[in-house]
Image: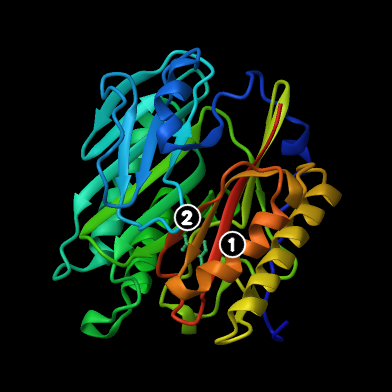
């Protein structure tokens, strides 16, 4: 690990004891597109959201009962997969500014899909929409962010001299800092990925009535402590977010890559970046277990999503991961730009124990 850096590993024992009073309100499932209708028919309630990746037709779930979200990331697997956030109780729809909202007893899922304006600074766009989403979760009574996804084009381009990902981080950071001066200790898990085609700026997120526990990774400098070479404002996300519910628990794993300390390791070596990423995930799980925040192990993840920068790496990555995650259901592989130009892949997932 590079010297002179501070790693903030957050463990809040009092929060760990505070078990939630409601049963797990939502879980993620990856369903093959050709099985979607059958899957939806057997659900007790319409899902909070159905998310489609790629540029095909959006799935047809009624917009009156659920959110339809479309993300312009090309799928790499042989069979198209759809991401579903199920609901344990009836779903209600709402809206706020550009956000569309689906909520149940315990959680709120909201989405924003806008035209990206490459000529406009992402800093301002990110700040404005994050400020609106903070208003939204406060007004709706789900003030605790659990998990966020951010997708936009030209991630690693540098119009005006600053990389678009860094512009995004700058605006997001401003919005978080305005909301709470200690926001570094209540950060959600997140992913921020560049689409390689298309022109949409998409954010969706999960928030809850009650808060979870931020999990950091002892092998990695917390992203919110990255030094300024990675951008004028550090990235605002936690490595993972653990929730305890009445009869279960969840761990939302952030996009995880080949970063040790704060540096990218194994430049131009996809196979070793993949191994390092798996080690990071295993370490996060062990740390969460030791600090009593989660019982997740790497073998228990579902909703595993893998972002791959170069299509030609799909064969190797999928053969390793299909073996490694045998219990987790279908894995969603998409083409995407990782937020550092030297990162070749990133993996996220959800641990769900009921
Ligand atoms: C990293 O470890 C990889 O900016 O929201 C992973 C997950 C990464 C989320 C974000 C960035 C984000 O720094 C990059």
Element class at badge 1 = helix
Q: Residue beneath label 1, please?
A: 318
Mark 1 and 2 residues: CB-CB less than 8 Å, in contact? yes
Determine crowd level at label 2: few under 14, some 14-19, many 20+ residues with C-alpha closer than 10 A: some
Q: Is residue 105 visible to us here?
A: yes
Q: Is mark 2 within 8 Å of ligand 1?
A: no
Q: Position of residue 197 (x, y in %)?
A: 26, 64
Which residue lies at the image location 54% right of the left edge and 28% below the top edge?
26
Mark 1–mark 2 Cα distance, whole angstroms, equals 9 Å
Which residue lies at the image location 20% right of the left edge and 60% below the top edge?
199
First-in-chain label (1 vs 2): 2
Q: Nearer the viewer, residue 135 or 253?
A: 253
Q: Quadrant of residue 263?
A: bottom right
Q: Nearer the viewer, residue 286 or 129?
A: 286
Q: Position of residue 303 (x, y in %)?
A: 56, 44
Q: Is residue 254 visible to us here?
A: no
Determine crowd level at label 1: few under 14, some 14-19, many 20+ residues with C-alpha closer than 10 A: some
Q: Is mark 1 within 8 Å of ligand 1?
A: no
């Amino acid at each position: 690990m590079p010297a002179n850096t501070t790693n903030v590993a957050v463990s809040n024992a009092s929060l760990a004891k505070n078990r939630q009073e409601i049963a797990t309100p939502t879980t993620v499932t990856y369903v093959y597109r050709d099985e979607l209708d059958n899957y939806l028919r057997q659900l007790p309630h319409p899902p909070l959201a159905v998310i489609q990746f790629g540029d095909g037709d959006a799935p047809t779930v009624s917009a009156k009962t659920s959110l339809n979200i479309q993300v312009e990331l090309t799928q790499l697997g042989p069979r198209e997969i759809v991401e579903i956030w199920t609901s344990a109780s009836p779903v209600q729809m709402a809206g706020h500014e550009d956000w569309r909202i689906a909520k149940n007893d315990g959680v709120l899922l909201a989405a924003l899909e806008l035209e990206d304006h490459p000529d406009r600074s992402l800093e301002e766009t990110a700040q404005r929409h994050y400020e609106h989403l903070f208003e939204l979760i406060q007004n709706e009574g789900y003030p605790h962010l659990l998990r966020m996804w951010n997708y936009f084009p030209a991630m690693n381009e540098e119009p005006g001299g600053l990389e678009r990902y860094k512009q995004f981080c700058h605006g997001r950071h401003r919005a978080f800092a305005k909301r709470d001066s200690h926001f570094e200790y209540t950060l959600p898990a997140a992913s921020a990925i560049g689409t390689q085609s298309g022109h949409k700026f998409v954010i969706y997120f999960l928030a809850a009535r009650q808060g979870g526990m931020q999990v950091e990774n002892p092998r990695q400098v917390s992203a919110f402590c990255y030094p300024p070479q990675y951008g004028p404002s550090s990235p605002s996300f936690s490595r993972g977010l653990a929730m305890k519910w009445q009869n279960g628990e969840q761990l939302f794993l952030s996009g995880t890559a080949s970063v040790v300390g704060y540096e990218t390791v194994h430049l131009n070596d996809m196979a070793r970046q993949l191994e390092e990423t798996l080690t990071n995930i295993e370490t996060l799980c062990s740390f969460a277990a030791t600090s009593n925040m989660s019982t997740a192990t790497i073998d228990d993840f579902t909703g595993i999503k893998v972002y791959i920068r170069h299509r030609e790496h799909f064969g190797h990555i999928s053969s390793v991961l299909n073996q490694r995650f045998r219990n987790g259901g279908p894995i969603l592989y998409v083409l995407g730009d990782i937020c550092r130009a030297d990162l070749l892949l990133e993996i996220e997932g959800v641990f769900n124990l009921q």
